[in-house]
Image (spheres, rainbow, N blue to C red):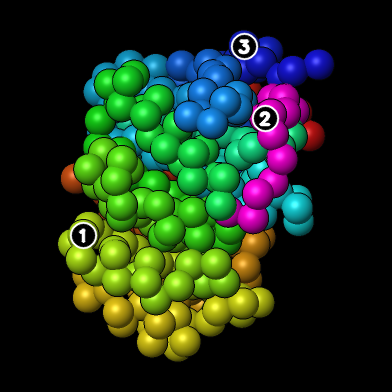
Amino acid sequence: MTFHPSSYEFTPSGGPVPIRASTVLPARRENVELQTDDGHTLVGELALPESGPVHATLITLHPLPTHGGFMDSHVYRKASYRLPALAGVAVLRFNTRGTASPRGTSTGAFEEGIGERYDVEAAVRFAVERGLPNRWLVGWSFGTELALMYGAVEPVASQVEGAVLLSPPLHRATDKHLQQWAESGKPLTVLVPEHDDFLQPAEAAARFSLVPQARVVGVDGAKHLWVGEKYAARVLNEIVDDVTGAGSGPAGLPTEWDGPSATAPA
């Protein structure tokens, strides 16, 4: 059975309540399908602010599907639960080719980041065709490889403002791709966990020195998967600071909500 966001049951809070990992705030959510130029159908979800303008659009690229990554990887799930309501940010999540989640399974099979170029292009094209403004790529782990390899070249480069990278391993992405980002001049923020399994802050700073406009941020205590509300919240604050004019505020995004909310299924 395919999960549909209309199944969320929103109830009044009766006063401010803590925003927890499973808290879903109001938004306009819809299941979507993305069509790639090489004939695949990718399943996903678009979450938009319930009212008011869209200040920015996140096009999320998930971690490695052969190691459990998918559109519901927890940072992206929390982004879709919170950012439309808290920051006026639209969040597009989708499964790359061959990847499955409760939303469904995208056609095709994992292609080691090569065929996934068409997946990135399809997601950006969808956002453009829907008229979603201020578009940013947000990659996590394997998703950072896709952002680095394909985000600074056409047809994507002219359609996005920049990218935010979470835990980049720099396995598939090479110095050539970093040089393309340098030449594009587009903003690049790189969030690197102190205890990352693949690339830690000092080495990341050295590798990304090829991109003069890159901002490399080491996050004390964090690990590759950003487990724990403290670290997930830090990521969301950093993203909102980068992609919106108002940012997350001096104290970061609110941690309580006074209004209707739902609880996501486990």
Residue 108 is covered by the magenta coloring = yes
Residue 47: image location, x then y, percent: 47, 25
User: Disc 1 residue type?
Assistant: Ser
Magenta highlight range: 102-113
**Label located before the other in sequence (2 or 3):** 3
Residue 24: image location, x then y, percent: 58, 29
- The residues tagged by marks 2 and 3 sit, at their Cα atoms, a distance apart of 21 Å
Residue that badge 3 annotates: 6
Q: In the picture provided, is 71 more to the left or to the right than 215?
A: right
Residue that badge 1 annotates: 184
Which residue appears at 65% of the width and 49% of the height? 111
Which residue appears at 40% of the width and 82% of the height? 207
Q: Quadrant of residue 72?
A: top right
Establish if 8 lies above or below 265.
Answer: above
Q: Residues within 10 Å of mark 2 (few under 14, many from 20)?
A: many
Examine the rendering and report whether any part of residue 137 can be seen.
yes
Residue 23 is covered by the magenta coloring = no
User: Disc 2 residue type?
Assistant: Ser
